[in-house]
Amino acid sequence: MRTFAGLTASALSALVLVGSITLLPAVAGAADVERTKQGKELAFNRKKGNCLACHMIADGVSPGDLGPPLVAMKGRFPDRAKLRAQLENPMVNNPDTAMPPFGKFKILSDDEINKIIDYLYTL
Amino acid sequence: MKKTVLLTVAAVALLAGYGAAFADTSPDQDLKTWHTYFDKKFPGVDLQEYSNGVYAIDKVSRDSWEAIEEFPPYEPMIEDGEAMWNKPFANGKTYASCFHGTPAVADKFPYWDLSRKMVISLPLAINECRKANGEKPLKYAKGPITRLLAYMAYESRGQVTDVKIPNKAAMAAYKDGRRYYFTRRGQLNFSCATCHVQNAGMHVRTDILSPALGHTTGWPVYRSKWGDLGTLHRRFKGCHKQMRAKPPKPQIAEMRNLEYFLTYMSNGIEYNGPSARK
């Protein structure tokens, strides 16, 4: 079910990407920038992802250190589904994790998680 | 050797936050595990130091805290509390009639009441004293009760935490509190232990998470964020909000059992309330 939702979302973004490449490349670039900007806001916002509370992230001010720094994400998470799974429910990987299950407990919507992931891939 | 292994296993269970994993351990064992765990995490920090919360483990914030404690913001509140202690109720009696004549009773609470079969905390005893003397109960989180508690804490400074678990029913209350401490709750899926055991000493943005050890010795606390004194159960409420869990009403049975467990885990540490925190 979860995988299905994840697949649908990435399938959708792939479609959007294909569509924009063929038709409006310049606008697509702007839309991507907007998405990653929103993703960053969601990652920093205390009422949303608040990832900065626990992770060092790029230019984020006063990061926490409960979790590892979020750097070199493309290299470390070539598989988007793996990254998605960590945000969906980190207890699958580590039952004792301190990280909240953003997807499973609906702390963030599917779209918000995808925006954050888009942003993470710029790191 | 075998003992070390056992301790390590218990510490791992603690770290892991499996309340259930030590369902069959005794409070005495739990206390040893707790000491071993924090000793390893913060080598060289003396047991008594843990009464100073996060300032026991963070040199930087400790310096400004020490400056604050030299002219403590709660000082006038201790005096207000002393006035409350001395002021007779309408019936002519005072609080002294309920506490064997002395405000220095920190080390008598919380305790298991054998006949009523429940944990009695000091704030609860204060309100029961008021009711018995025909006065209205005070609110539990903030306000006048914190003044009286500040005075009583001040007079109790130097007493040593010594919670006792006299029988099976008391043990059930202790275990209930322990289970509460290690159970994940709220939208963010944290347990108390996630922050104050597993991640004690780590930063959540600019906050450093204080160790659970010593968490009950310094109350009531003057918090800059509150701009006032608050009770331990007020802090319990606040931490529930951080977990995005429903904040429990102060002094309900669950919170008293939580206090019973948490205070037991500070056995041996001196009371030093009231105190100041960020």
Image (cartoon, coloured by chain):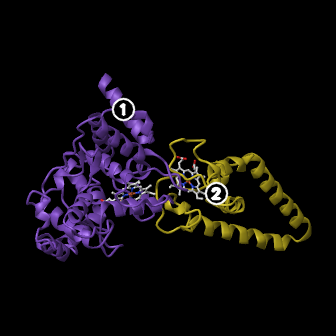
Chain colours: A yellow, B purple
Q: Is residue B101 above or below residue B167?
A: below
B193 sits left or right of B50 in the view:
right
User: Do the residues marked 1 and 2 share a common chain?
Assistant: no
Count of numbered tags: 2
B152 sits left or right of B53 in the view:
left
Q: Position of residue A89 (x, y in %)?
A: 62, 48
- Residue type of the residue flagged with mark 1: Thr
Q: Which mark is residue A106?
A: 2
Residue plotted at (21% across, 53% down): B49
Residue plotted at (40% across, 47% down): B181
Subunit ID for the residue under disc 1: B
Q: Which mark is residue B237?
A: none
- Residue pointed to by mark 1: B8
- Residue type of the residue flagged with mark 2: Lys
- Find numbered disc 2 in the image and state the secondary structure of the residue it sits on: loop
